[in-house]
Image (cartoon, grey):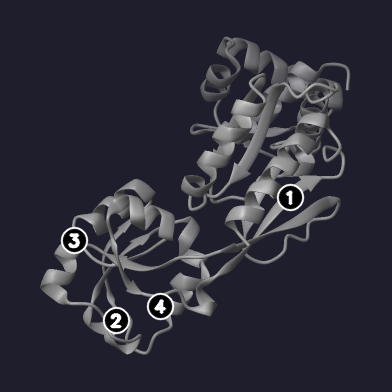
């Protein structure tokens, strides 16, 4: 293709659905967007979009073009990530993706890594979605659950994620402590929406013959922990967080609550000096904390 700017414009029009929206994203005048689309259609000899009062809708040819453009854009992002990571020094940007459920436990490890390698600019991405290492979205991923099986990824086991059911003294003063799993039916829970909703402990709780009442759900771990601390209900909390919050154990960890933790890198990024530095740092830390 002779003009990548025109293709990029078409991709954004297809994504946003309007000329004005694409112009805003691209930082150009709307007339430039129209000119790019018209020129591209004339060069290719096909209609890429159906024009209608609400905006633009990609035709079959337009969708094909956008798939090609999307792939090219992702491959360039992958190349850019590799290029930024070249060199023998432990410096520059290092992107790690993980779950918000794990970040409180991981933060001291990240801090000690930065103390050791002060020239690193560390970016931590926490999201429900699985970031694509093969497209350069991150250098490393710390994942929870079944063993990742994406092709060309290198997977290292780190240990098990463990937690238990905790509550505050204020909650126990009113409701007492559960004496068994069956007794949980008479208690109230605070649950975190998002990362933990598919966790083994959440599935275990929901599969009880009579599950407890979930009086509060939140996407924020901070809100989740503070609600338990203030006596709103019981909740699943790691031991380290529970100690810091002044919580008391309501029910000890059950074997089926645990989940495997994995460190994942893409084979093209695995041998980078800074990636290897982080891998070794994580492995050493996990040996002390997640065995």
Q: Position of residue 63 (x, y in %)?
A: 73, 41
For disc 2, the neighbor class at 10 Å (few under 14, some 14 to 19, many from 20) is: many
Q: Nearer the viewer, mark 2 or mark 4?
A: 2
In this orientation, which residue lies closer to the viewer: 102 or 62?
A: 102
- Looking at the rendered image, the quarter that the N terminus falls into is top right
For disc 3, the neighbor class at 10 Å (few under 14, some 14 to 19, many from 20) is: many
Question: Which is nearer the N-term, disc 2 or disc 4?
Answer: 2
On screen, residue 24 above or below 245: above
For disc 1, the neighbor class at 10 Å (few under 14, some 14 to 19, many from 20) is: many
Instruction: Say whether residue 100 is left or right of residue 125.
Output: left
Instruction: Say whether residue 154 is left or right of residue 168.
Output: right
Instruction: Say whether residue 109 is left or right of residue 279.
Output: left
Q: Which mark is residue 264?
A: 1
How far is the residue under mark 3 from the one under mark 1?
38 Å
Measuring 50% from the left and 49% from the top, which residue is drawn there? Answer: 105
Query: Circle 3 is placed at which residue position?
Result: 231
In this orientation, which residue lies closer to the viewer: 103 or 57?
A: 103
In this orientation, which residue lies closer to the viewer: 289 or 148?
A: 289
Query: Circle 4 is placed at which residue position?
Result: 206
Question: Which is nearer the N-term, disc 4 or disc 1?
Answer: 4
Query: Circle 2 is placed at which residue position?
Result: 184
Q: Position of residue 70 (x, y in %)?
A: 75, 35
How far is the residue under mark 3 from the one under mark 2?
16 Å
* Tag 2 secondary structure: helix
- Looking at the rendered image, the quarter that the C terminus falls into is bottom right
Measuring 83% from the left and 23% from the top, which residue is drawn there? Answer: 83
Question: Which is nearer the N-term, disc 1 or disc 2?
Answer: 2
Q: Is residue 179 visible?
A: yes
Q: Nearer the viewer, mark 4 or mark 3?
A: 3
């Amino acid at each position: 293709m002779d003009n990548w700017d025109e293709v990029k414009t078409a991709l954004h029009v297809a994504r946003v659905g309007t000329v004005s929206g694409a112009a805003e994203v691209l930082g150009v005048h709307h007339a430039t967007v129209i000119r790019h689309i018209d020129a591209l259609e004339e060069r290719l000899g096909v209609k890429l979009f159906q024009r209608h009062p609400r905006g633009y809708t990609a035709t079959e040819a337009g969708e094909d073009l956008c798939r090609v453009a999307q792939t090219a854009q992702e491959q360039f992002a992958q190349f850019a990530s590799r290029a930024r990571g070249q060199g023998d020094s432990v410096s520059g940007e290092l992107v790690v993706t993980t779950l918000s459920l794990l970040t409180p436990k991981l933060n001291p490890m990240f801090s000690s890594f930065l103390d050791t390698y002060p020239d690193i600019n560390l970016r931590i991405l926490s999201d429900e979605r699985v970031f694509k290492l093969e497209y350069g979205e991150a250098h490393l991923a710390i994942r929870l659950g079944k063993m990742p099986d994406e092709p060309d990824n290198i997977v290292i086991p780190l240990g098990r994620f463990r937690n238990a059911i905790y509550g505050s003294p204020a909650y126990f003063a009113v409701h007492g402590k559960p004496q068994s799993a069956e007794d949980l039916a008479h208690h109230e829970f605070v649950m975190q929406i998002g990362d933990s909703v598919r966790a083994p402990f959440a599935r275990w709780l929901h599969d009880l013959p009579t599950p407890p009442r979930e009086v509060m759900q939140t996407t924020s771990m901070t809100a989740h922990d503070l609600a338990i601390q203030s006596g709103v209900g019981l909740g699943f909390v790691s031991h380290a967080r529970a100690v810091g919050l002044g919580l008391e154990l309501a029910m000890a960890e059950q074997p089926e609550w645990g989940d495997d933790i994995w460190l994942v890198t893409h084979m093209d990024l695995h041998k980078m000096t800074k990636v290897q530095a982080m891998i070794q740092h994580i492995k050493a830390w996990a040996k002390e904390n997640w065995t």
